[in-house]
Image (cartoon, rainbow, N blue to C red):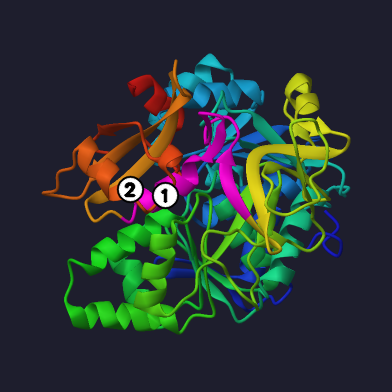
Amino acid sequence: MRRDAYPYLHSDNNKIALVEGSNSFTYSEVDRRADLFASGLLSGTDDLNEERIAFFLPASINYVTAMHGVWRAGGIAVPLNVASAVMELEHYLSCASITRLIANPDSHKALEPICRELSITLLSVEEVMASTVPVLPEVSEDRRAMILFTSGTTNKPKGVVSTHKTIRAQITTLVEAWEWSKEDTIPLFLPLHHIHGIINILSCGLWAGATVHLFAKFDIPRITEQVASGTYNVFMAVPTIYIKLIQYFDGIENKGVQSICDGFKAMRLNISGSAACPVKLFNQWQDLTGQVLLERYGMTEIGMGISNPYTGERRAGCVGQPLPGVQVQLFDDNNSPITAEGIPGEIRIRGNNVFLEYWDNPKATNESFESGWFRTGDVAILEDGYYRIMGRSSVDIIKSGGYKLSALEIEGVLLTHESVAEVAVIGVADDTWGEAVTAIIALNPDCSLSYDQLKTWCDGKMSSYKVPKALRLVDELPKNAMGKVTKPKLHELI
């Protein structure tokens, strides 16, 4: 790969790039490992020519070695969710026609049957590593580089194909917008089969010359200890993580809480994404830490497209403005652009950050584009120059009594009820309303809530046509690996 054109790793060789437990790795060490892994994959051949190499690895030096090694050898990297059951992997492995799967030795026993069934060679990073580095192939920016699978919250997961040009655009727009630098240090505990962890944290950090601390899972005691000690100056998480942190504060002494909150306060940036950040949480976090969360909007297919500003007003409940190099436009149901503010429409995106195709699915690819614009399926409204997400057109926009209602807006209000721990709002088919607004709620411990109590509480807090027509109490809402509620499962429940 031409390092001058695609500097996925910063050139400050002696700077610490990665920290994993008690081990640390400089940029030159990471660079060397990637070269040796690429050489081992090539094993005497000139180029992988877009061979799909999957890896089943947690956040670790091995993960970074595998990803960058695949790229340098001319292959397509396919990171898998390490939280998946083995049988769940079959769709991803067969869909992408995987030839080799890289996993840590302790996972091999569980993975061997499915690899045998699909004729996939199962290897560890150590088994692939070569001892010398020959000349590696030059890889053009238009070559396919990565396949990430969609979350599958609304349909069967599709393989999203990004080129090196796509990845470069996704990284550089965030490095510019969020002012990444060599001075940054950030923890990475998010799943690394998802755009948030791969691009926003790991790839931006390594591009900028920052230091990334790798965690196989969200280790609250260890991470908050390092926050309190001033280790980090940037923090990125999903809303669920911020909620867990606030809950954790309730179980430790006040002195410890203050120390952690002071650690967050000293940071230059806290970001929330991958799911809507409730206004209640936004305000709670600011009250506790002084940090005004920067919320942004993105998808597997586009990386990040919209963001609240790094310098400037960050609005609760809004995802901000188009990022550098990204074109954003709202369209109505007739495919006409919406030019006035205050009118909801589908978000469509255009730019080098947009993916190439869905793997081996030309029908889905064609249906996802309209006149060069990628159709996100998300509905938003523009308010004084800032975009506010109303939800996915298929699951979060409820057509009730002639109104188009945002489930996310109603959820945000219901979350302010003192008894409500979690809430999801869906539309259920109804002869009178078309779709009846239905609230599925998980309560805080030792709390109770009847429908009549909820209806009375809603009076004056939202328009009458937005008030839920039904209430269903559950112990916990079903979620995917990124903390997003899987609403199709709620429809099945109802």
- Reading the image, the residue beneath label 2 is 458
The total number of labels drawn is 2
x%, y% of residue 12?
Answer: 70, 77
Q: Is residue 414 magenta?
A: yes
x%, y% of residue 464?
Answer: 41, 41
Q: Using the image as rendered, state which of residue 276 and residue 104 is in the foreground.
A: 276
x%, y% of residue 376?
Answer: 69, 39
> On the rendered structure, is 51 left or right of 219?
right
Q: Quadrant of the C terminus?
A: top left
Structural crowding at the residue carrying mark 1, measured as other residues with C-alpha within 10 Å and reported as few (<14), some (14–19) or many (≥20): some
Marking on residue 477: none
- Reading the image, the residue beneath label 1 is 462
Please provide the residue range marked out in magenta.
388-416
Q: Quadrant of residue 78?
A: top right
Q: Quadrant of residue 239?
A: bottom left
Q: Is residue 127 magenta?
A: no
Residue at image x 54%, y 80%? Answer: 268
Which element is circle 1 on? loop
- Type of amino acid at the residue the image marks with label 2: Cys
**Could you tell me how far apart the alpha carbons at marks 1 and 2 are, in whole angstroms?**
6 Å
Which element is circle 2 on? helix
Q: Is residue 83 visible?
A: no
Q: Is residue 313 visible?
A: yes
> On the rendered structure, is 166 left or right of 189?
right
